[in-house]
Image (cartoon, rainbow, N blue to C red):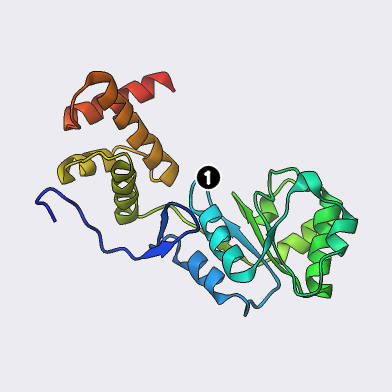
Amino acid sequence: MSPGQLAFDLPHRAALGAEDFLVSDCNLAAVRMVDAWPDWQRPVQALVGPTASGKTHLVRVWRERSGAEALDPATLDVVSLDAHVPGSSLAVEDADRAGFDEQWLFHLLNLAVEKRFSVLLTGRTSPTRWQFTLPDLVSRLSAVPVTEIGAPDEALLRTVMLKHFSDRQLTIEPKILEFLAVRIDRSLEAAAAAVDAVDREALRSGRKISRQLVAEALERTATTD
């Protein structure tokens, strides 16, 4: 390891794709929930967290383990749902905003009990805050166990940014990464956006990444938002 290279003691979980899933305190409960399948206490589970928090990665891990089908609101109806065999595993991502029909979703939750489906729902907030109006659906969702992915801790935030820089074949000194990390919102979405801003500033100016360049990249981003 070179003197300027950073390393953090965070375990990696392979996500089905090009990236690793980084496990930290903020998402450990979510990882354990996924790992607990097929021994879930309830047939339906909700995984919630902000945009870019890792929900999709964990759904992909769960689908690989369970053979779950990802349901698309554009192609669903009650008949197609009834056609699933008992014991099926089904993933419903962005249930809070993807346009799922309320009657269909209510039917799914009923079938989860009747046919022993395993259903993983995802959304940005707890199902009790989803904007549904069907009383029976609201009641069913209020009973769904919720596992939340929280805001990333400092080690995870820096590790994610370091990985983004590495993916772009960019190097950044430890002190400059620390300078960047304390100047962005504590979210993985903000971390990715910050790395993109620094990369664009480096390309635009033809300079290597420095504290001054990072400051200018953040300032430029702030003025264009």
Quadrant location, the N terminus: bottom left
- Residue 92 point in image, percent of width and height: 69, 55
Q: Is residue 156 visible?
A: yes
Examine the rendered structure and indicate whether residue 80 appears above or below residue 40: above
**Quarter of image, res 67:** bottom right
Q: Residue 189: horizontal and vertical position, in percent?
A: 44, 42
Side of 16 where 216 appears, left or right: left
Q: Quadrant of the C terminus?
A: top left
Q: Quadrant of residue 224?
A: top left
Q: Is residue 216 above or below residue 28?
A: above
> Which residue carries the number 1 mark?
51
Q: As drawn, which residue projects farthest toward the left?
A: 3
Q: Is residue 133 above or below residue 183?
A: below
**What is the crowding at mark 1: few (fewer than 14 residues within 10 Å), some, or many (at least 20)?**
few
| Label 1 secondary element | loop
Q: Residue at x 75, y 74 (%)?
A: 87
Amino acid type of the residue tagged 1 in the rendering: Thr
Residue at 56 percent across and 76 percent down: it is 36
Relative image position of residue 147 (x, y in whole percent): 56, 64
The answer to whether residue 134 is visible is: no
In the rendered image, which quarter is residue 66 located in? bottom right
Q: Position of residue 165 (x, y in %)?
A: 29, 41
What residue lies at 31% left-to-right and 24% top-to-bottom? 219
Question: In front here: 175 or 65?
Answer: 65
Left or right of residue 16, residue 133 in this image: right
